[in-house]
Amino acid sequence: DRTPASRCVRTTCPYCGTGCGIDARLPADLDSRAVATIEGDRLHPTNSGSLCSKGSHLGETLSTRGRLLRPELDGQPCHWEQALDAAAERLGAIIETHGPDAVAFYCSGQLLTEDYYVANKLMKGFIGSANIDTNSRLCMSSAVVGHKRAFGSDSVPACYLDLELADLVVLTGSNAAWCHPILFQRIRAAKQAHPGKRLVVIDPRRTASCDDADLHLPIKPGTDALLFNGLLNWLAEQQAIDPDYIARHTEQFDSALAAARSSAPDIATVAAACELEVAAVEHFFRWFAETPKTLTAFSQGVNQSSAGSDKVNAIINVHLATGRVGRPGASPFSLTGQPNAMGGREVGGLANQLAAHMNLEDPRHRALVAQFWGSERVPEQAGLKAVELFEAIEAGRVKAVWVMATNPVDSLPDADRVRAALERCELVILSDCMDRTDTAASAHIRFPATAWGERDGTVTNAERCISRQRPLQPSAGESRPDWWIICQLARRLGFGAAFDYQAPWQIFREHAALSVLDNRPDVLPRGFNLGPLAHINSTSYEALAPIQWPVSMEAPAGSARRFDDGRFDTDNGRARFVPIQPRPPHYRCDHAYPLVLNTGRVRDQWHTMTRTGLSPSLSGHRPEPEVSLHPDDAARYGLRPREIARLRSRWGRLLARVALSDQMRPGELFVPMHWNDQFAREGRVGALVNPATDPLSGQPESKHTPVAIEAL
Ligand code: SF4
């Protein structure tokens, strides 16, 4: 409706880490909950007016259907005061009796930066524990470790424009065509405009991203680090590295090269270990060597591994060796999964981080944050990472958990054990916008949170671009913003003075002020900086245009790239090569569980479908959980197309409809991550997935679980 009586709200899509801008058109009546017309924001730098299927159908998810509309206490609707008082009283009693480490927050990359900031401040600054982690642990924590080891800070060097400027794009562990569709469309359009541009896809499956690829490497799962070690060694042998860049801007090259040489001495060895054609590996290596503008984009296929951090550094190593970091069209590039995984990282939403990209283990950083917050309790030890947090709940060491905007009974690995742990937990508080989720059944206290379309704050996408989410309509029922709920709890716990915010812009301003470098250059990490935004007010926050951090007096309009001058965020300014010894996946296949299960997204669903499941249009693409497998495997296990199969692992089981696909490698299965008990009986793939994690990042190995399959 474009009549004069309509209004347009500029906001940001709540789904993937691409972070597309949206124009929502609504009737002029601010109290209306009428369905909005959703269009891409033509002025947003990310998507220039385009949207994928998920973003386009957001209008179908805006009703109050399925929403949690009132607070609940012990299964009964109640008033806000009752729910908040009870939560504070029970949480306070557990802290008093068992200490601050007996409680935990489990947050989400769906939260806005302002929500995340106050949650982290309450837990780390005032309750006095670092037990705050997030479902972003399942998404990009291996990339965080890789960035910090190599660059000295968790900084993504590239920007989206580099996907277009690159002459060679390498997509590894990423089905961007379905998982970051607008970014993939940008690659495709650039390829059409520049026919010499090449795309290489490294993925065990032949995904939709391969439709545009010049080369697909159907790699054996778990061998990515060996492939990139082989590339590093081969580049050195071919004298295709940049010795001057290595000498001036890096350290530890020799040890990284020695590790690469010992594990991947030649192309034949690499091809055999990765189960690839020798000629295909050679093609890839030659293209990489001869193309200065090469960008390697990686996502969950790399990160979700018990060796995910090493895989990330194996990728970064080849970019450092060729001097291709932070240059136009040339960088390693982590494609973040969630809409605000990056914003969570900025405010310390991980159990081993502090706010403003400061380090929990650094006493100078702890002192600075404590002084800034007026707190005496910033903990010295890192808290529990996601998987170990729920193990601690199971063991009774953590007696209270507040789950915010996520559904761990579906999304965590070994999900039946997670459900059992929550059911025996003394206190489970849940803030969610949706009523019926698989986690809701375990909650003692439920807070109705506002949803996309009602929320007001900021998110940061995969290229460090901060964008506003703006409300289109009034809050549904009695729902409230997450930051408001957290501040109400903080006041009741006795910390009111530090949580006296009236609006999200005040929280954002404090967050930006904490990042300012010029007051303490000796202790603050270089890199993350929102300096000029520390003076933001209500009006300028409302008008805030998308901007990429770092933002500084020298770069008031933000920074597209990082490290383009060859200076990194380490103490001596040099990037670090990391020697990589490739490791296989933690759990191997055997006679009982002979197949490898891979999980991931489908094109038209998001996470556990609490929102996208509301859209009939989106559900048409894949109406039920399917297990994709090679026809040879179907024949071997006596499975017919479209029948229901049962999958079993050591951890749980699942029902799914059989879909034959010669795009799969024999011996491997793929099941989407989305379905759950609300949409399909025994449809939670998390119940099957093994709980092995990367020892450094804590990220689960969701791409490699040994399983068995049989007809139902
Ligand atoms: Fe939303 Fe991602 Fe699609 Fe953009 S690409 S519209 S951010 S789901």
Image (cartoon, rainbow, N blue to C red):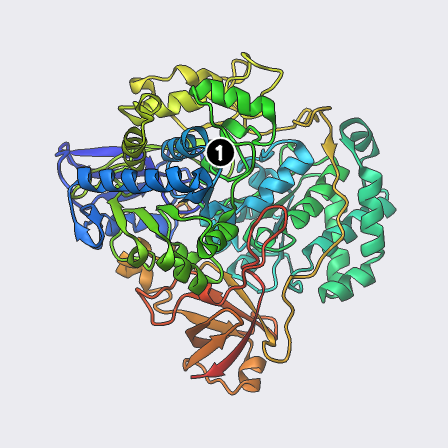
The residue depicted at 50 percent of the width and 69 percent of the height is 651
The residue depicted at 68 percent of the width and 24 percent of the height is 565
Q: How many marks?
A: 1
Residues packed near mark 1 inside 10 Å, few (<14), some (14 to 19) or many (20 plus): many
Whole-percent x and y of residue 512?
44, 22
Dividing the picture into quadrants, the one containing residue 83 is top left
Q: In terms of depth relative to the viewer, which is nearer, 225 or 364?
A: 364
The residue depicted at 43 percent of the width and 57 percent of the height is 411
Would you name the residue on which mark 1 appears?
A: 348
Q: Is residue 315 above or below residue 612?
A: above
The residue depicted at 49 percent of the width and 72 percent of the height is 628
Q: Is residue 544 above or below residue 688?
A: above
Mark 1, secondary structure of its residue = loop
Q: Is residue 391 above or below residue 243?
A: below
Judge left or right: residue 170 versus residue 498.
right
Residue 234 seen from this side: no
Q: Quadrant of the C terminus?
A: bottom left
Residue 275 seen from this side: yes
Whole-percent x and y of residue 679?
31, 66
Dividing the picture into quadrants, the one containing residue 678 is bottom left
Q: In terms of depth relative to the viewer, which is nearer, 59 or 485?
A: 485
Mark 1 Cβ and ligand 1 under 8 Å apart: no
Q: Amino acid at mark 1?
A: Gly
Residue located farthest toward the front when viewing the structure as drawn:
97
Judge left or right: residue 121 versus residue 329.
left
Judge left or right: residue 688 versus residue 486.
right
Whole-percent x and y of residue 286?
77, 51
Judge left or right: residue 431 versus residue 95.
left
Q: Quadrant of the N terminus?
A: top left
Whole-percent x and y of residue 232?
78, 47
